[in-house]
Amino acid sequence: MKPEKHLETILTGEEDSILDIGTGTAGVFHFHYWNSKPFQRKVCLDVYEIRRDIPPSWDKIIADAASLPFKPRSFNVIQCTETIEHIPPKKWTQLLQQLTQTTHNLIYLTTSDETRHQGTPQKQAEQRNPHLKFQAYPPKTTLTKHGFHILYEDPHHTVAFKKVTPKWESTFKDMEHYIIDLTKNLEIKTVLDVGTGNKGVVAQHYWENTKKIEKGYACDIWTIKPLPPVWTPLKMNALNLLEVLKPKSIDHVQACGFLEHLTKKEGYRFIEIAETLARKTVFLTAATYNHGLTPDYKVKIDGNPYHAYKSNWHWSDFQELGYETNIDDMREGVTFSEEAIAWKKL
């Protein structure tokens, strides 16, 4: 997915002002999108020079990004793309604090590794503009410790965002929160958990002690954590579940962190199986990008050969199938950005 598509994922359409940091001669990131909006304020900023053909509707300011000349909460959106790697690491904290102080809503930030530019015209640009010199490639932890959520990561890029004023500042919604919200007013007697593995059943305590289910099934092709007698282990390929369970025999089917370990074709096939088995609800989560720098990252950690990443999923993949998703909560920064969560009442 292109960086601008990641940005569009977290925008709500209600933004009214934009600050582009590190504009340079490349221009405003995602310019055509922003320029089409009747914003109250559009500003582009760079420490050295700014592309001359940017329309006069944009204010152009020469300033240091680590010392922004704006009042607190001056902008709805700040984007800082391919810029932080040109700033000395000793100023990273100051920069991220300045960004947080200057927006009242959203920061969108991307980085790139200098190794990607070795032997390219980038080196010529550095000779012309000393501020383009790569200082360092900030690790993911530099961003996460400042409250950023990672949208995408590979060996040479990181795409991250931060919501400065979430709707529920003290609440972070994980998978169990969504499961409870989905099923709290329903009578659930049977549950199927797919991809159980060594972590166990998601929301296990809720199912056993609040819902007091009569029967549960835990499915995994590799290993299944020991569970109380109410759960029947099914050590098998989940794509064959209809061979052992009857259609409409399960009240609630859930598969958390499972679909990304199937191909996209297999994933859609499993969703069909889940909806065939379920009587009331289906709950799914899937990674929006590989967690780790290689598809076999998890395989190397836990030795599970089935833990390799074979696909990535987007909220729209589920919405097109009639599922509700957590995308609005993700945009508010109060739930996972690296995990699309989706649910359907049948």
Image: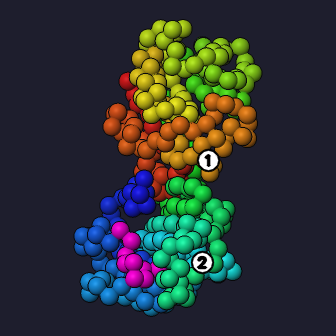
Residue 297 pos. (x, y %): 66, 44
The residue beneath circle 2 is: 134
Q: Amino acid at mark 2?
A: Phe
- The answer to if 57 sits in the magenta stretch is no
For image coordinates 47% across by 51% down, the residue present is: 329
Stretch of the chain drawn in magenta? 22-30
Q: Residue furthest front?
A: 119
Q: Along the horizontal axis of the image, is 92 left or right of 284?
A: right
Residue 324 falls in image quadrant: top left
Residues at marks 1 and 2 touching, judged by CB atoms closer than 8 Å: no
For image coordinates 63% across by 34% down, the residue present is: 307
Q: Amino acid at mark 1?
A: Thr
User: Tag 1, which secondary structure?
Assistant: loop
Work out which quarter of the rendered image holds the C terminus and state it.
top left
Residue 195 pos. (x, y %): 60, 27
The residue beneath circle 1 is: 294
